[in-house]
Image (cartoon, rainbow, N blue to C red):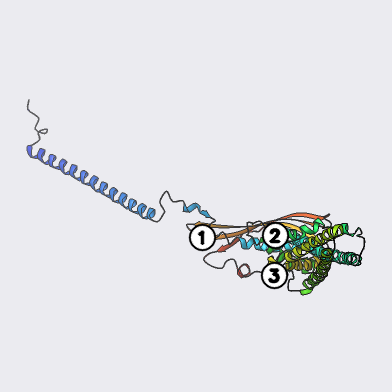
Amino acid sequence: MALPAAAQVTKDELDAAKHALELRIAQVAGDALVAQREAEARQARLEAERAALLAQLPAANVRALAGSVETRQFGAAGLVRAFDLAQQLAQELCTALPAGERVVLYDPLASQGVLAARTVHDTLVRMGDDMARRNKELQAYVDAHTPPGAVLGTLSTALTVVPALLRAGADTASLFKTDTGAAGLAYGDGARDLFASALAASCPQQLAGLGSGYLGELDTVQHERLLGRLRALAVHRADYANRIAQLQKLADAAKGEEKKELGTVAAAAGAALKAVDAFIDSLKAGETGERSPLYNAARYLGYANRTAGAAVLDFDLRLEGMSIVRDSLFTGQTLRLSGVALLWYRVHAPDGSLRMANTLRRIGKPVEVDLKGDAAGGAFWNGP
Protein backbone atom coordinates (compact mmCIF):
# COMPACT_ATOMS: atom_id res chain seq x y z
CA MET A 1 0.00 0.00 0.00
CA ALA A 2 1.41 3.37 -0.93
CA LEU A 3 2.16 6.05 1.79
CA PRO A 4 0.45 9.34 1.79
CA ALA A 5 2.32 12.10 0.13
CA ALA A 6 2.93 13.93 3.46
CA ALA A 7 4.37 10.82 5.08
CA GLN A 8 6.69 9.93 2.36
CA VAL A 9 10.44 10.53 3.19
CA THR A 10 12.90 10.92 0.54
CA LYS A 11 16.21 9.10 0.45
CA ASP A 12 18.06 12.33 0.84
CA GLU A 13 16.26 13.08 4.06
CA LEU A 14 17.13 9.67 5.43
CA ASP A 15 20.76 10.11 4.60
CA ALA A 16 20.79 13.55 6.26
CA ALA A 17 19.17 12.19 9.44
CA LYS A 18 21.62 9.32 9.57
CA HIS A 19 24.54 11.67 9.16
CA ALA A 20 23.27 13.95 11.92
CA LEU A 21 22.88 10.99 14.26
CA GLU A 22 26.41 9.83 13.56
CA LEU A 23 27.72 13.33 14.26
CA ARG A 24 25.89 13.40 17.59
CA ILE A 25 27.23 10.00 18.60
CA ALA A 26 30.73 11.12 17.70
CA GLN A 27 30.33 14.32 19.72
CA VAL A 28 29.12 12.41 22.80
CA ALA A 29 31.95 9.94 22.48
CA GLY A 30 34.46 12.77 22.19
CA ASP A 31 33.07 14.48 25.27
CA ALA A 32 33.33 11.22 27.25
CA LEU A 33 36.91 10.72 26.11
CA VAL A 34 37.82 14.23 27.17
CA ALA A 35 36.20 13.71 30.58
CA GLN A 36 38.03 10.41 31.00
CA ARG A 37 41.36 12.00 30.15
CA GLU A 38 40.70 14.88 32.54
CA ALA A 39 39.88 12.39 35.29
CA GLU A 40 43.04 10.46 34.56
CA ALA A 41 45.03 13.69 34.67
CA ARG A 42 43.53 14.64 38.01
CA GLN A 43 44.28 11.16 39.37
CA ALA A 44 47.83 11.44 38.16
CA ARG A 45 48.26 14.79 39.90
CA LEU A 46 46.86 13.35 43.14
CA GLU A 47 49.22 10.37 42.90
CA ALA A 48 52.13 12.69 42.30
CA GLU A 49 51.24 14.88 45.28
CA ARG A 50 50.80 11.81 47.50
CA ALA A 51 54.14 10.41 46.37
CA ALA A 52 55.84 13.74 47.10
CA LEU A 53 54.33 13.77 50.60
CA LEU A 54 55.29 10.18 51.31
CA ALA A 55 58.81 10.92 50.18
CA GLN A 56 59.13 13.36 53.10
CA LEU A 57 58.04 10.78 55.70
CA PRO A 58 59.97 7.74 56.99
CA ALA A 59 59.11 4.27 55.90
CA ALA A 60 56.34 2.36 57.66
CA ASN A 61 58.82 0.16 59.60
CA VAL A 62 60.76 3.11 61.14
CA ARG A 63 59.82 3.97 64.77
CA ALA A 64 61.71 7.21 65.22
CA LEU A 65 58.54 9.19 65.71
CA ALA A 66 57.94 7.50 69.07
CA GLY A 67 61.52 8.21 70.25
CA SER A 68 64.19 5.69 71.30
CA VAL A 69 65.94 5.42 74.71
CA GLU A 70 69.64 4.62 74.95
CA THR A 71 71.67 4.70 78.19
CA ARG A 72 75.03 3.29 77.15
CA GLN A 73 76.42 6.32 75.36
CA PHE A 74 76.53 8.60 78.40
CA GLY A 75 76.60 6.08 81.28
CA ALA A 76 79.31 7.90 83.26
CA ALA A 77 77.70 11.32 82.96
CA GLY A 78 74.98 10.41 85.47
CA LEU A 79 77.63 9.90 88.16
CA VAL A 80 77.93 13.68 88.31
CA ARG A 81 74.45 13.79 89.82
CA ALA A 82 75.39 11.01 92.24
CA PHE A 83 78.45 13.05 93.21
CA ASP A 84 76.20 16.01 94.05
CA LEU A 85 73.97 13.76 96.17
CA ALA A 86 77.00 12.49 98.13
CA GLN A 87 77.91 16.05 99.06
CA GLN A 88 74.35 16.78 100.17
CA LEU A 89 74.24 13.65 102.33
CA ALA A 90 77.61 14.53 103.88
CA GLN A 91 76.25 17.91 104.97
CA GLU A 92 73.13 16.28 106.44
CA LEU A 93 75.19 13.70 108.30
CA CYS A 94 77.47 16.37 109.75
CA THR A 95 74.38 18.13 111.09
CA ALA A 96 73.12 14.88 112.66
CA LEU A 97 76.40 14.00 114.42
CA PRO A 98 76.61 14.66 118.18
CA ALA A 99 77.36 18.35 118.62
CA GLY A 100 80.79 19.19 119.99
CA GLU A 101 81.98 15.59 119.88
CA ARG A 102 84.73 14.22 117.67
CA VAL A 103 84.22 11.05 115.64
CA VAL A 104 86.49 8.73 113.72
CA LEU A 105 85.45 6.85 110.59
CA TYR A 106 85.43 3.11 111.10
CA ASP A 107 87.83 1.28 108.82
CA PRO A 108 88.48 -2.45 109.43
CA LEU A 109 92.01 -2.19 108.08
CA ALA A 110 92.89 0.75 110.32
CA SER A 111 91.31 -0.96 113.35
CA GLN A 112 93.36 -4.11 112.78
CA GLY A 113 96.46 -1.98 112.37
CA VAL A 114 95.85 -0.18 115.67
CA LEU A 115 95.35 -3.46 117.53
CA ALA A 116 98.47 -4.96 115.96
CA ALA A 117 100.50 -1.85 116.79
CA ARG A 118 99.41 -2.06 120.40
CA THR A 119 100.50 -5.69 120.43
CA VAL A 120 103.94 -4.74 119.13
CA HIS A 121 104.27 -1.97 121.73
CA ASP A 122 103.06 -4.19 124.56
CA THR A 123 105.43 -6.97 123.52
CA LEU A 124 108.35 -4.55 123.51
CA VAL A 125 107.43 -3.32 126.98
CA ARG A 126 106.84 -6.82 128.32
CA MET A 127 110.04 -8.24 126.85
CA GLY A 128 112.06 -5.30 128.16
CA ASP A 129 110.68 -5.75 131.68
CA ASP A 130 111.11 -9.51 131.46
CA MET A 131 114.71 -9.23 130.32
CA ALA A 132 115.50 -6.75 133.09
CA ARG A 133 114.07 -9.17 135.62
CA ARG A 134 115.92 -12.12 134.09
CA ASN A 135 119.17 -10.16 134.15
CA LYS A 136 118.82 -9.56 137.89
CA GLU A 137 117.94 -13.18 138.56
CA LEU A 138 120.70 -14.54 136.36
CA GLN A 139 123.27 -12.19 137.93
CA ALA A 140 122.21 -13.29 141.36
CA TYR A 141 122.46 -16.91 140.25
CA VAL A 142 125.96 -16.38 138.83
CA ASP A 143 127.08 -14.57 141.98
CA ALA A 144 125.70 -17.39 144.10
CA HIS A 145 127.66 -20.03 142.18
CA THR A 146 130.91 -18.22 141.81
CA PRO A 147 132.22 -19.11 145.32
CA PRO A 148 133.19 -22.77 145.73
CA GLY A 149 130.55 -24.96 147.34
CA ALA A 150 127.51 -22.70 146.66
CA VAL A 151 124.11 -24.46 146.67
CA LEU A 152 121.79 -24.05 143.64
CA GLY A 153 118.57 -22.30 144.60
CA THR A 154 115.14 -22.32 143.00
CA LEU A 155 116.01 -19.72 140.36
CA SER A 156 116.29 -22.39 137.67
CA THR A 157 112.48 -22.66 137.46
CA ALA A 158 112.19 -18.89 137.04
CA LEU A 159 114.60 -19.03 134.13
CA THR A 160 112.59 -21.51 132.07
CA VAL A 161 111.41 -20.31 128.68
CA VAL A 162 107.97 -18.67 128.53
CA PRO A 163 106.06 -20.19 125.55
CA ALA A 164 104.51 -16.82 124.67
CA LEU A 165 108.00 -15.41 124.08
CA LEU A 166 108.85 -18.23 121.70
CA ARG A 167 105.75 -17.44 119.61
CA ALA A 168 106.29 -13.68 119.66
CA GLY A 169 108.54 -13.55 116.61
CA ALA A 170 106.23 -15.53 114.31
CA ASP A 171 103.08 -13.78 115.55
CA THR A 172 104.51 -10.29 115.13
CA ALA A 173 105.72 -10.97 111.61
CA SER A 174 102.13 -11.69 110.51
CA LEU A 175 100.40 -8.90 112.44
CA PHE A 176 100.15 -6.52 109.51
CA LYS A 177 99.14 -9.03 106.85
CA THR A 178 95.42 -8.84 106.12
CA ASP A 179 92.97 -9.43 103.30
CA THR A 180 90.59 -6.68 104.40
CA GLY A 181 89.55 -4.36 101.59
CA ALA A 182 86.73 -2.10 100.49
CA ALA A 183 84.08 -3.65 98.26
CA GLY A 184 83.47 -2.06 94.89
CA LEU A 185 80.41 0.15 94.59
CA ALA A 186 78.35 1.30 91.64
CA TYR A 187 80.18 4.63 91.73
CA GLY A 188 83.50 2.82 91.89
CA ASP A 189 86.04 1.89 94.52
CA GLY A 190 86.45 5.55 95.46
CA ALA A 191 82.87 6.07 96.65
CA ARG A 192 83.78 5.67 100.33
CA ASP A 193 86.80 7.93 100.05
CA LEU A 194 84.67 10.46 98.18
CA PHE A 195 82.12 10.53 101.00
CA ALA A 196 84.86 10.71 103.64
CA SER A 197 86.33 13.75 101.90
CA ALA A 198 82.88 15.31 101.63
CA LEU A 199 82.43 14.81 105.39
CA ALA A 200 85.82 16.34 106.07
CA ALA A 201 84.89 19.34 103.94
CA SER A 202 81.54 19.79 105.71
CA CYS A 203 82.63 19.36 109.34
CA PRO A 204 86.42 19.00 109.65
CA GLN A 205 86.42 20.00 113.32
CA GLN A 206 84.34 16.93 114.24
CA LEU A 207 86.45 14.30 112.47
CA ALA A 208 89.35 12.87 114.43
CA GLY A 209 90.39 10.44 111.70
CA LEU A 210 89.33 9.21 108.28
CA GLY A 211 90.63 5.65 108.53
CA SER A 212 93.12 4.41 105.97
CA GLY A 213 95.38 6.63 103.94
CA TYR A 214 97.99 8.91 105.45
CA LEU A 215 98.26 8.12 109.16
CA GLY A 216 101.07 10.46 110.18
CA GLU A 217 104.15 8.39 109.40
CA LEU A 218 106.11 11.57 108.78
CA ASP A 219 105.65 12.44 112.47
CA THR A 220 108.71 10.94 114.17
CA VAL A 221 107.42 11.03 117.76
CA GLN A 222 105.87 7.57 117.83
CA HIS A 223 108.70 6.07 115.79
CA GLU A 224 111.30 7.45 118.20
CA ARG A 225 109.36 6.07 121.16
CA LEU A 226 109.27 2.59 119.66
CA LEU A 227 112.95 2.80 118.73
CA GLY A 228 113.70 3.79 122.32
CA ARG A 229 111.84 0.71 123.55
CA LEU A 230 113.71 -1.42 121.05
CA ARG A 231 117.10 0.03 122.07
CA ALA A 232 116.33 -0.61 125.74
CA LEU A 233 115.42 -4.22 124.91
CA ALA A 234 118.66 -4.58 122.94
CA VAL A 235 120.69 -3.35 125.94
CA HIS A 236 118.97 -5.86 128.23
CA ARG A 237 119.58 -8.56 125.62
CA ALA A 238 123.32 -7.76 125.46
CA ASP A 239 123.64 -7.87 129.26
CA TYR A 240 121.76 -11.14 129.33
CA ALA A 241 124.07 -12.63 126.70
CA ASN A 242 127.13 -11.64 128.80
CA ARG A 243 125.70 -13.28 131.90
CA ILE A 244 124.93 -16.45 129.93
CA ALA A 245 128.55 -16.51 128.84
CA GLN A 246 129.66 -16.19 132.48
CA LEU A 247 127.25 -18.97 133.45
CA GLN A 248 128.62 -21.18 130.72
CA LYS A 249 132.16 -20.69 132.04
CA LEU A 250 130.95 -21.78 135.50
CA ALA A 251 129.33 -24.85 133.93
CA ASP A 252 132.53 -25.73 132.08
CA ALA A 253 134.54 -25.55 135.33
CA ALA A 254 131.97 -27.46 137.41
CA LYS A 255 131.62 -31.23 137.77
CA GLY A 256 128.91 -33.75 138.42
CA GLU A 257 125.39 -32.66 139.29
CA GLU A 258 126.40 -29.02 139.60
CA LYS A 259 127.74 -29.06 136.07
CA LYS A 260 124.49 -30.59 134.86
CA GLU A 261 122.34 -28.02 136.65
CA LEU A 262 124.46 -25.08 135.47
CA GLY A 263 124.21 -26.39 131.90
CA THR A 264 120.42 -26.69 132.20
CA VAL A 265 120.08 -23.11 133.43
CA ALA A 266 122.41 -21.85 130.68
CA ALA A 267 120.40 -23.71 128.02
CA ALA A 268 117.10 -22.26 129.31
CA ALA A 269 118.58 -18.77 129.36
CA GLY A 270 119.91 -19.28 125.83
CA ALA A 271 116.44 -20.32 124.60
CA ALA A 272 114.92 -17.17 126.06
CA LEU A 273 117.67 -15.15 124.38
CA LYS A 274 116.82 -16.75 121.00
CA ALA A 275 113.16 -15.82 121.47
CA VAL A 276 114.15 -12.20 122.05
CA ASP A 277 116.43 -12.27 119.00
CA ALA A 278 113.62 -13.68 116.85
CA PHE A 279 111.25 -10.94 118.01
CA ILE A 280 113.79 -8.18 117.34
CA ASP A 281 114.50 -9.57 113.88
CA SER A 282 110.78 -9.77 113.06
CA LEU A 283 110.36 -6.04 113.69
CA LYS A 284 112.70 -5.23 110.76
CA ALA A 285 113.63 -1.89 112.28
CA GLY A 286 115.94 -1.05 109.37
CA GLU A 287 113.20 -1.26 106.72
CA THR A 288 110.15 0.84 105.89
CA GLY A 289 106.70 0.17 104.51
CA GLU A 290 104.68 -2.99 105.00
CA ARG A 291 107.84 -5.08 105.37
CA SER A 292 108.58 -3.45 108.72
CA PRO A 293 106.13 -4.10 111.59
CA LEU A 294 107.97 -1.47 113.65
CA TYR A 295 107.33 1.18 110.98
CA ASN A 296 103.67 0.19 110.67
CA ALA A 297 103.25 0.09 114.43
CA ALA A 298 104.53 3.66 114.68
CA ARG A 299 101.97 4.79 112.08
CA TYR A 300 99.02 3.14 113.74
CA LEU A 301 100.03 4.08 117.29
CA GLY A 302 100.09 7.73 116.26
CA TYR A 303 96.65 7.31 114.70
CA ALA A 304 95.38 5.60 117.84
CA ASN A 305 96.62 8.46 120.03
CA ARG A 306 94.95 11.09 117.85
CA THR A 307 91.62 9.24 117.81
CA ALA A 308 91.60 8.08 121.43
CA GLY A 309 88.19 8.52 123.06
CA ALA A 310 86.43 9.55 119.83
CA ALA A 311 83.09 8.09 118.84
CA VAL A 312 83.16 5.69 115.89
CA LEU A 313 81.15 6.43 112.74
CA ASP A 314 80.41 3.36 110.64
CA PHE A 315 78.65 3.83 107.29
CA ASP A 316 78.02 2.30 103.91
CA LEU A 317 77.19 4.25 100.77
CA ARG A 318 75.86 3.27 97.38
CA LEU A 319 75.96 5.78 94.55
CA GLU A 320 74.49 5.21 91.12
CA GLY A 321 74.16 7.56 88.18
CA MET A 322 71.49 7.35 85.50
CA SER A 323 71.79 8.81 82.01
CA ILE A 324 68.93 8.77 79.50
CA VAL A 325 69.48 9.77 75.89
CA ARG A 326 66.30 10.33 73.90
CA ASP A 327 66.39 10.50 70.11
CA SER A 328 63.38 12.03 68.38
CA LEU A 329 62.80 12.67 64.71
CA PHE A 330 61.66 16.26 65.14
CA THR A 331 63.39 17.37 68.38
CA GLY A 332 66.77 15.67 67.92
CA GLN A 333 68.80 14.11 70.75
CA THR A 334 68.53 15.18 74.39
CA LEU A 335 70.30 13.96 77.55
CA ARG A 336 68.80 13.71 81.03
CA LEU A 337 70.99 13.01 84.07
CA SER A 338 69.90 11.79 87.47
CA GLY A 339 71.47 10.03 90.45
CA VAL A 340 70.56 7.81 93.39
CA ALA A 341 72.31 7.73 96.77
CA LEU A 342 71.61 5.21 99.54
CA LEU A 343 73.32 5.72 102.91
CA TRP A 344 73.16 4.00 106.27
CA TYR A 345 75.26 5.03 109.23
CA ARG A 346 75.76 4.15 112.89
CA VAL A 347 77.62 6.01 115.62
CA HIS A 348 79.18 3.88 118.38
CA ALA A 349 80.90 4.74 121.60
CA PRO A 350 84.51 3.48 121.83
CA ASP A 351 83.26 0.50 123.88
CA GLY A 352 80.98 -0.55 121.01
CA SER A 353 77.65 0.61 122.42
CA LEU A 354 75.30 2.19 119.88
CA ARG A 355 74.79 5.93 120.16
CA MET A 356 72.64 6.61 117.09
CA ALA A 357 71.76 5.17 113.69
CA ASN A 358 69.81 6.19 110.60
CA THR A 359 69.22 5.45 106.92
CA LEU A 360 68.96 8.07 104.18
CA ARG A 361 68.12 8.00 100.51
CA ARG A 362 68.18 10.69 97.87
CA ILE A 363 67.17 10.73 94.20
CA GLY A 364 68.44 13.66 92.18
CA LYS A 365 65.95 15.57 90.07
CA PRO A 366 66.80 14.90 86.41
CA VAL A 367 68.76 17.64 84.71
CA GLU A 368 68.23 17.98 80.98
CA VAL A 369 71.27 18.69 78.87
CA ASP A 370 70.87 19.92 75.32
CA LEU A 371 73.59 18.18 73.35
CA LYS A 372 73.40 20.93 70.76
CA GLY A 373 74.02 23.71 73.26
CA ASP A 374 74.46 24.66 76.92
CA ALA A 375 70.90 24.42 78.18
CA ALA A 376 72.11 22.92 81.46
CA GLY A 377 73.80 26.17 82.42
CA GLY A 378 77.24 26.92 83.73
CA ALA A 379 76.33 26.02 87.31
CA PHE A 380 75.90 22.39 86.33
CA TRP A 381 79.18 22.09 84.47
CA ASN A 382 81.26 24.09 86.91
CA GLY A 383 79.50 23.30 90.18
CA PRO A 384 81.47 22.34 93.30
- Marks 3 and 2 sit apart, C-alpha to C-alpha, by 15 Å
Q: Please state which amino acid type lies under the numbered disc 3.
A: Thr
| Residue 230 pos. (x, y %) | 79, 69
- The answer to whether residue 31 is above or below residue 378 is above
Of helix, strand and loop, which one carries label 1? strand
Q: Quadrant of residue 92?
A: bottom right
- Marks 1 and 3 sit apart, C-alpha to C-alpha, by 56 Å
Q: Nearer the viewer, residue 68 or 346?
A: 346
Of helix, strand and loop, which one carries label 3? loop
**Rendered image: mark on residue 177:** 2
Residue on which disc 3 sits: 288
Q: Please state which amino acid type lies under the numbered disc 1.
A: Gln
x 62%, y 63%: residue: 80
| Residue 182 pos. (x, y %) | 67, 58
- The answer to whether residue 179 is above or below residue 135 is above
x 36%, y 52%: residue: 50
User: Label 3: how many residues lie within 10 Å, few (<14), some (14-19) or many (20+)?
Assistant: few
Check the picture and name the quadrant holding the N terminus.
top left
Residue on which disc 1 sits: 333
